Amino acid sequence: MSKNGDHVSSILQTARTQVLAEGRGLDRDQLVEILQLPDEDVPALLELAHEVRMAWCGPEVEVEGIVSLKTGGCPEDCHFCSQSGLFQSPVRSVWLDIPELVESAKQTAKTGASEFCIVAAVRGPDRKLMDQVREGIKAIQAEVDINIALSLGMLTQEQVDEFVEMGVHRYNHNLEAAKSYFPQVVTTHSYEERWETCQMVREAGMELCCGGLIGMGETLEQRAELAAELAALDPHEVPLNFLNPRPGTPFGDQEVMSSADALRAIGAFRLAMPRTILRYAGGRELTLGDLGTRDGLLGGINAVIVGNYLTTLGRDADEDLNLLTELGMPIRELSKTL
Amino acid sequence: MTYCGHCGEDLASGDHARCRDRLTMEPPRFCTHCRRRMVVQVVPRGWSARCVEHGVLTG
Ligand code: SF4
Ligand SMILES: [Zn+2]
Ligand SMILES: [Zn+2]
C-alpha cells in the first residue's frame, strides 16, 4: 500500500492474508510478482515483511561472526568466488592457526554473538581439515561460550556424523543459485550434490544454514525460484548474499545490483519463508550502504554477520550493535539458541 | 608508494578512484612497493597482509 493509502498491490493483499495471518509462504509465481513490484510499493513490501518477521520470529536478532580457516586455492569454479584457485584472482591461499581461530571466536563472543562460523574454501573436507577442525573446536569450546557452526563444503555421511559428535551446532551449505541457473554459476559440481549435503546435515540433527547469492545475472523468475527452492528445503537459517563482483572471477564485471532490487529480494525471501532466520550476509555494504542495513532490518531481516567477512571487510561491529539497540531489537541470547 | 594496493597497477597511470573506494571495504591485495600479491588474512575484527619482501601491514 502506498503511504496515502489509496492503492494496494493485490499481491501484497494476498501476502497479508496468506503469509502474515496464516504463516504460509508465497510460492514461486507469487514471488515473481513481488520482485516486479514498482518502486513506490517497495516501502509497503518492506513494512509487510517486517510485520511477518515480528509475528512469526519475534523482535530478536541473531548475531554471528565468521572466519576463514583456509582461504583461497579452492578446486571448484563458483563464478562469483575470489577463493577459487581456477581464476586469476589476487586472493592467495592461507591457513589460520588454532590460537588465531580461538582469538577470533573470543572477539566474536564479545559482540554478544551466539554463533561462530568456521569456513574453509574447499570442495569438501579431507582428513587434514577434519583434524584441524576437531582441534580448533576443542580449543574454542575450552575457552569461549559460543555455538560453533561450520562451512566446509560437501560432506560424506561419515563426516556429518563426526561433526555431530564434535558438538557442531549448525552447518552452512548454500544452494547458491536457482536450480535452473546453477549450471551458469558452477560447473565443477552439481546442484543435486549441494542439495544432498543439505539433506544429510538436517537428517543428522544439526541445524541447517542454507542460502544463496543474488545479483549474479539471474532473471527475476530465477531469483524467485531460488527463494521457493530454499523454502522447500526449509533450513533453520537462510543467509542472503548480494554479488560483490570480485576482480578476476567470471562475474567480476557484473554490475552491482541496485538497492531497490536488493530490498525487493529481502522482502520476497521473507514472504517465502516467514519463520526462518533470514541473515544479511556478504555484499550488503556495497549494495545497500549504511541506510540499507537499517532498511533490511526493518524489512524482514532478523540476523546479521558482525565484523569482517572471509576476504572482505564488513561494517564496524559496534555500528551494527548500536543500530540494533536503536531499533529496539534485542540480540538473541546464546542459551536460547541451544 | 608505486603500485595500487587494490588492482596492482601503476599508481601513476590510470584512475584508481574506484580502487581507493574498494580499499575501505577490503584489505589491499598487492604490495604497493613491489606489486607482489600479498598473503592476506581477514579475521572478524581486523586483517593482515604480508609481502615476503616488504613485511606485514595490518588494519
Ligand atoms: S566451493 Fe566455496 S570456496 Fe570453492 S569456489 Fe565455490 S564458493 Fe568458492
Ligand atoms: Zn587500482
Ligand atoms: Zn613488497
Image (cartoon, coloured by chain):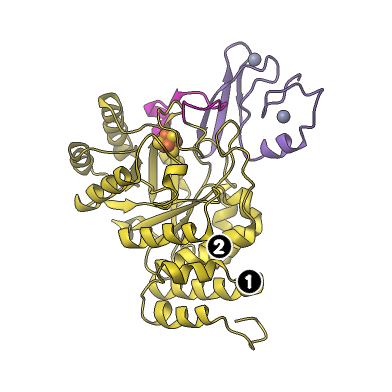
Chain colours: A yellow, B purple
User: Which SS class for mark 2?
Assistant: helix
Measured from the top left, where is residue A318 in percent x and y?
Answer: 57, 51
Q: CA distance from mark 1 to mark 2?
A: 18 Å
Residue type beneath disc 2: Gly
Quadrant occupied by the N terminus of chain A? bottom right
Q: Is residue B58 left or right of residue A306?
A: right
Vertical arrangement, residue A298 with respect to residue A278, above or below:
below
| Residue in front for this viewpoint, A195 or A236 | A195
Quadrant for residue A53, please give it.
bottom left
Vertical arrangement, residue A148 with respect to residue A269, above or below:
above
Stretch of the chain drawn in magenta: A84-101
Q: Check if residue A95 falls in the magenta segment.
A: yes
Between discs 1 and 2, the one toward the N terminus? 1
Measured from the top left, where is residue A192 in percent x and y?
Answer: 30, 46
Residues at marks 1 and 2 on the same chain = yes
Judging by the rendered image, the residue that carries numbered circle 1 is: A38
Residue under the image location 48 percent in, 31 percent down: A83
User: Which SS class for mark 1?
Assistant: loop
Q: Residue furthest right?
A: B12
Q: Is residue A148 left or right of residue A250?
A: left
Judging by the rendered image, the residue that carries numbered circle 2 is: A296
| Residue in front for this viewpoint, A145 or A173 | A173
Q: Main secondary structure of the magenta part?
A: loop
Q: Residue furthest top?
A: B53
